[in-house]
Image: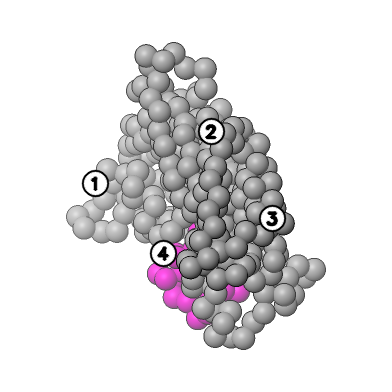
Amino acid sequence: AGFDSSETILIGATDGVGTKLKVAQAVRNHSGIGIDLVAMCVNDLIVAGGEPLFFLDYYATGKLSIDDAASVIESIADGCKIANCGLIGGETAEMPSMYKSGDYDLAGFAVGAVKRGDVLPRGVSVGDVVLGLPSSGMHSNGFSLVRKIFESEGIDYNDFAAFDKGRTFGEILLEPTKIYVKEVMPLIKEGKVKALAHITGGGLVENIPRVLAKDQSVHINVAESDWSLPPLFRWLKEIGMLGQEELLRTLNCGIGLVLIVSKDVAKEIACQLNECMTLGVITQRNNDEAQVIIK
């Protein structure tokens, strides 16, 4: 990362892909799963202000399929290229008594660097603007709920989606998690970002509060913001009869990364970032109200 060693802090992140793997295994498509794995780790690094340096993977299966493993590892390498970090090694384990034929599990580990004093979040204050970057789809969270909906409704992953003609549900659900490193790192290095929230399990309502003080909240008025629910999430809400609270606490709802920036640079950053959405502002929290209020 080009930092002086005396002023550098190393940070780490580890994660998996969850039950998105069950969809990949069902349709025999593993070509994007490795990108998911890298994304789940490196997106967590940049939330702390860290620039990804290197990545390692762990691949566990009952009986090794060379084709499946090669596809996964190739996509991990693709993810590392997108994240601008090195893939320096990994581990493969065969455990017949642990996994059924065709099943495998993944874990990833990433290490990054950040200058001492530049660790995020820092200096979030009332009046700061909350921006959102779009997700590429489901990313890698909420698949237990989604799989349950598909099972209860008798929907096959190979069926074509009415809301996205030309693509099957499997193709839509397996769209790789977006990696935000190259988009956001320049802004972090310029000191223009006060905080970031990676919208994973828990959605907007549980991930944004992690970077707020206890006396701060975010008010998002959907009608006045640039955000609208993408077709996939509207379909899931309808077919699964999901209430707003469950939807917002389980799925990313079209927002993969949240940025908190000063009001004086908000317009500049929104124009610089592709498809950036203005969501709301940081406000003073009233008593015990929720820290993320969406209307």
Q: Check disc 4 and give the amino acid type.
A: Arg
Name the residue carrying label 2.
54
Which comes before the other along the chain, label 2 or label 4?
Answer: 2
Tell me the CA gap for discs 1 and 2.
Answer: 37 Å
19 up-or-down from 211: above or below: below
Tell me the magenta residue range: 233-257
Spatial separation of the CA atoms under disc 2 and disc 4: 31 Å
Outermost residue to the right = 166
SS of the residue under disc 4: helix
Label 1 sits on a secondary structure element that is loop
Q: Is residue 295 visible?
A: no
Give the alpha-carbon distance from disc 4 to disc 3, as whole Å.
Answer: 37 Å
SS type, badge 3: helix
Q: Earlier in the sequence, mark 1 or mark 2?
A: 2
Mark sitting on residue 215: 1
52 in relation to 258, above or below: above
Q: Three-letter amino acid code at disc 3?
A: Ile
**Label 2 packing within 10 angstroms: few (<14), some (14-19), many (20+):** some
* Earlier residue among tags 2 and 3: 2
Pick the front one: 32 or 226: 32
Q: Contact, CB < 8 Å: mark 1 with mark 2?
A: no
How far is the residue under mark 2 from the one under mark 3?
24 Å
